[in-house]
Image (cartoon, rainbow, N blue to C red):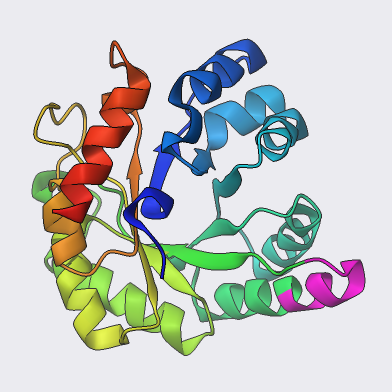
Amino acid sequence: MITARDRLIVAMDLSTLDSVNEAVVKIGDAVSYYKIGMESFYSLGEAALDLMAANRKKVFLDLKLHDIPNTVARSVKALCRLTPAMTTIHAAGGPSMLKAAVEAAADASVQLGLPRPKLLGITVLTSINDSEWAAVGHTQPIRDSVLRLAELCKQTGMDGVVASPQEAAAIRQCCGPDFLIVTPGIRPVFGDKGDQSRTATPAEAMRDGADYLVVGRPILAAGDPRTAAIEIVKEMEG
């Protein structure tokens, strides 16, 4: 049984090792999972993951790969040696790219003798609203596109998707109980939406079928990050 504490992922969007270490120390044992995204990885590289390993924290490496299949496959193989628990590929890259990523992760796991990271497809970013979606040429609702991409990910062997909590229930219904759903855009009852558009509270997201919740600023910007994380876990449990 995975506890609510183990389902909360703190988005570590920081650019110095000192700030990352300070946040991990402040949050302490309230959280076991952290997201290393583009800002932290491009600023700190492998050192960010080494710091997490030293503190016995799991890593969701969120780099949103999106390129031709061969390039993505080689990138996935390179990232596997860093042993993230999960990593991300843009589902919009298409079935050939997604299949190449899945095959590369399996091959690298065998070659390196390391656990294979869970591969998650990025669907539609939670900052995008209906008007922005239309501005880039889409004519169908965001929800329909998210579901199509989720189904594509399942068909190509991906482990799950990253999607807004507003689509979680529909994804769970169409992709089944074992398909991972990781939801950013989580705003606890004590937080504000920031630049997110399609949001939900922790309790709402868990109710609708999310497996993991990604929360950043409501925890990192809090006066007491550990207490903020504990309060979010309580909301998830509720």
Quadrant housing residue 102: bottom right
Question: Which residue sits at x=66%, y=34%?
Answer: 55
Residue occupying image coordinates x 44% and y 67%: 91
Which residue occupies the foreground of this view, 77 or 70?
A: 77
Q: Position of residue 149 (x, y in %)?
A: 34, 74
92 w.r.t. 134: above or below: below
Query: Where 120 falls versus 231 (above or below)?
Result: below
In the depicted structure, whether residue 179 falls above or below residue 19: below
Horizontal side of 45 relative to 130 (left or right) equals: right
Is residue 15 in view from this perspective? Answer: no
- Identity of the residue drawn at 38% across and 54% down: 7
Can residue 109 be seen at all in this image of the molecule?
A: yes
Is the stretch drawn in magenta largely helix, strand or loop? helix
Image position of 70 (left or right of 102): right
Residue 26 point in image, percent of width and height: 47, 18
Q: Is residue 118 left or right of residue 47?
A: left
Vertical order, 66 against 167 (above or below) = above
**Image quarter of residue 122:** bottom left
The spot of residue 88 in percent (x, y) is: 53, 57
Q: Is residue 238 magenta?
A: no
Judging depth in this view, the residue of 238 and 84 nearest the camera is 238
Q: Please name whichever residue, 151 or 19, is drawn nearer the observer in this view of the structure.
A: 19
Q: Which residues are magenta?
A: 106-114
Say whether residue 111 is magenta.
yes
**Residue shown at 24%/78% (left/top)?**
172
Position of residue 204 measured from the top left corner of the image (x, y, whole percent): 11, 56
Left or right: where 52 falls relative to 8: right
Would you identify the image quadrant in which residue 187 lies? top left
Q: Nearer the viewer, residue 226 or 170?
A: 226
Quadrant of the rendering where the N terminus is positioned = bottom left
Tally of marks: 0
